[in-house]
Structures are given as structure tokens and as C-alpha cells.
Image (tube, helix red, strand yellow):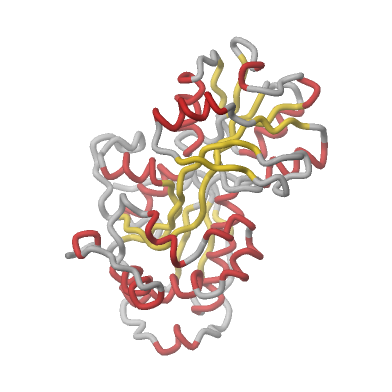
Amino acid sequence: MKFTMITGAVAIAAMTATSAFAQDEDRTGWPESFTVGTASQGGTYFAYGSGWANLVAEELGISGGGEVTGGPMQNMALVHTGDAQFGMTTMGPAAESLGGTNPIAPGLQMTNACAMFPMYQTPFSITALSSSGITSIADIPDGAKIGFGPAGSTSDTYFPRMMEELGVNFERRNGGWSDLGGQLQDGLLDVIAFAAGVPVPAVSQLEVQTDINIIEFTEDERAKILEAFPVSEFAIASDTYTTLENDARSVSMWNFAVANCDLPASFVKAAVNVVMSDNDRMVNIHKAARSTLPENWTKNTVLKWHPGAAEWFTENAGADIPADMIHGN
């Protein structure tokens, strides 16, 4: 079974390896190049994923790059089949993929995608133009045109259900985040429902170009969402966007990098080491990486770990990963 990438790759040239860790490793079976499945341009996955692909390629001396895809659901499929060595997903789509309910291949249990490292939490938030007068979810007009991101993305999978849970009647629109931002400015959309690591590049771009409202959940709305969906409480910090004057009430879902389970353990361990050993470098790629910390290995309760990743977290983060949660055991 093969899956086609949605659009062209972001080519990233490899450079001379500088990591003593990588130089000392046995490279038997390592691929000559690798691809990281990300999501659409203008979203956090694309910026974050292309950044860590570049970093790993540079440190390990292997050609690698980020690929624009449809997001978490497609990334699970691509990594499972080996069409992408690495990818990025959220826990909800990961669980659905393991259970055989991924809409890309219904009935296929995508068990050959393994946990690699924790990334960050994806908050759910809504953005509207200030000129619309929409300042709350209750203000969203009946039949509103809402952009939910790329089809099959975390946002597109869960945000429409959340809006229905809150009694919002809407017309569903899909597309890349940058494209949806343009549609919002042109009056073709009423709001955009974002599920992406913050700051979302498309939102940051919008607030430079126009006046926007970033809409939070009320306490009652958040309570309903927490009861109905696999999410946690979250607050978008006021310093995330210039538009925010106070922290914005939200919910979130954890994101993890995934690796094809058949990749050599030494290769995956070396890639994990590059990402997890220097958080400052990751934060320079994207502020969401403030949560890309070794202790957050505990946030994976869904996927089996790649043996190479499990070895790194056991040795460097004191992880006590049950044997039955490591692939191949």
C-alpha cells in the first residue's frame, strides 16, 4: 500500500556531522536520506517539522527534509508504510490510526508507526476579524463559514465535532492555514478554527496585516469539551500574540514525533539525541518546542515506543517504559 504526498518536499541539504554521539554510533542499515511528514504551510507542524528535519540532517550528515502533507492522519499512514521515515501526529489521530479508523485507510491498523519523542501541546482556538464583531463562540452566526484546516488534520478531525457539541451550526471549509488566512481577510470565511502549536504562523501573520479577535472558550464551554473529547485544559499565554491582553482559555492535545518501527534502533536513537539534547536549539526553530523536554515522555499513553527512542529516554530521562510498550517486545 502506497500513499502519495500531497505536495512537494522542502529540500534540505545535509551538512557535515558535528555530533560526537552520531559519529560514534554503528550506522549499519541507516537510510541514505529521510523525510519528515509535517502538514500544510503556514501551520506549526510545517515550521517545527522542517526545522528539526534540518537539524537532524545537519548533525547526522544525512540528506533529509520536511514534506508538506495533510497532517497527523496522513503522517501516520506514511510512516506506517515506510513512505516517510519520520512524521508528526497528535494522540487522538494516533489512537484512531492504531484502531483502524484512520479515514485514509479504514480498517488498516497502523501499528508500524512508533513513538519517537514528545513535541508540544496543540491548543484549540478560534480567530475572527475584529470587524466581524465576533468576540465569543456564542457570537458565531448561524451557518457561519468556518475554516478547519487541511482535511484529515487534527483540527479538521476534532474541531467540527467540538463546534457541534457547543451547538454551533456551520458550513465546513478546508485548506492550508495560510490559504484560509487569506480567505478570512477576503471575507470568504467568518472564522478559522485552529488546532496547532502556538504561536500559529498564520495567526501571527494575520495580526500583522489586520485587526483580529482570538476567541477563548468560556468555563462552561471548556467543561463540555473536556468531558466529550480526549483533551486537557490549556491556557494560551498572553505573550503568545500581540492581540492577547490576557491568557486565553483553551484545551489541548499532545503531539509526538513518530518513526517507522523498522528503522535501525541506532539511527532513531541518534535522531532523538539531536532533538532532545539541546532544547535551546529547538526553541529557536519554534517557541512551541519549549515543551520538547525529556520528562514529557510520559505524555505518550497510546503508541508503542521505537526501541531506539526507548533506549534514549531510559538512559537520559530515567524513563521507566513498560516492556510491552516497546515495539518488538
31 relative to 107, above or below: below
Q: Which of 224 and 15 is in front in this view?
A: 224
Q: Position of residue 153 (x, y in %)?
A: 48, 38
13 relative to 132, above or below: below
Q: Quadrant of residue 73?
A: top left
Q: Position of residue 219 (x, y in %)?
A: 55, 28
Q: What residue is shown at x 74% (from left), y 21% (from top)? A: 187
Q: What residue is shown at x 43% (from left), y 55% (from top)? A: 256
Q: What residue is shown at x 59% (from left), y 26% (from top)? A: 218
Q: Which of 2 and 268 is in front in this view?
A: 268
Quarter that holds the C terminus: bottom left
Q: Quadrant of residue 265?
A: bottom left
128 relative to 255, above or below: above
How many numbered dots are placed on residues in this image?
A: 0
Q: Which of 190 and 16 is in front in this view?
A: 190
Q: Where is residue 18 in the image (x, y as percent from the top left)?
A: 55, 85
Left or right of 200 in this view: 205: right
